[in-house]
Image (cartoon, helix red, strand yellow):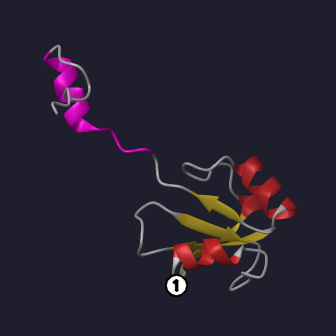
Amino acid sequence: MLCAVYKTRKKDGMYLYVPKKDHFEDVPEPLMAKFGRPELVTIIALEKREKLGLVDKQKLINELNEKGFYLQMPPKEDDLLEQHRESLGLSKTPDKKF
């Protein structure tokens, strides 16, 4: 099974996987509008790959077969301010004063 991988300029780490190049018919229009203009990154032969970075290969295959696409969201970024506040023994968010 081949799979085309696209990135967006709108959000680092967000990728759209479709079963073949330029096959966006199954991707909902609101998602395509939010994703923006897809930029081809690569075409992957899934049977030849054991691992796919941050993507669960079986989940990817299931989503491609069931939905016709898979959207990889970027990993959650750590909130460095929260971590710093915790290291100082403070609450994660400052108290709001009215």
Q: Position of residue 9 (x, y in %)?
A: 41, 75
Q: Residue at x 64, y 74 (%)?
A: 30
Seen at 58% across and 57% down, the residue is: 72
The residue that appears at 61% across and 77% down in the rendered structure is: 32
Residue 76 image offset from top left, x and y in percent = 43, 44
Residue 64, image quadrant = bottom right
Q: Amino acid at mark 1?
A: Arg
Q: Magenta stretch: dominant SS?
A: helix
Q: Residue furthest top?
A: 89
93 in magenta: no
Instruction: Identify the residue position indicated by label 1 in the image.
Output: 37
- Residue 15 higher or lower than 36, as above or below: above
Q: Secondary structure at mark 1?
A: loop
Residue situated in front as seen by the camera: 62 or 36: 36
Asked if the magenta segment contains residue 82, the reply would be: yes
Looking at the image, the residue that sits furthest to the front is 98
Residue bounds of the magenta highlight: 76-88
From the viewer's side, name the closer residue of 20 and 47. 20
Name the residue located 17 percent from the left edge and 13 percent from the top edge. 89
77 relative to 73 in the view: left or right: left
Left or right: 17 in relation to 63: left
- 73 vs 42, nearest the viewer: 73
Dot 1 crowding, Cα within 10 Å, few <14, some 14–19, many 20+: few
Query: Against 46, is 18 above or below?
Result: below
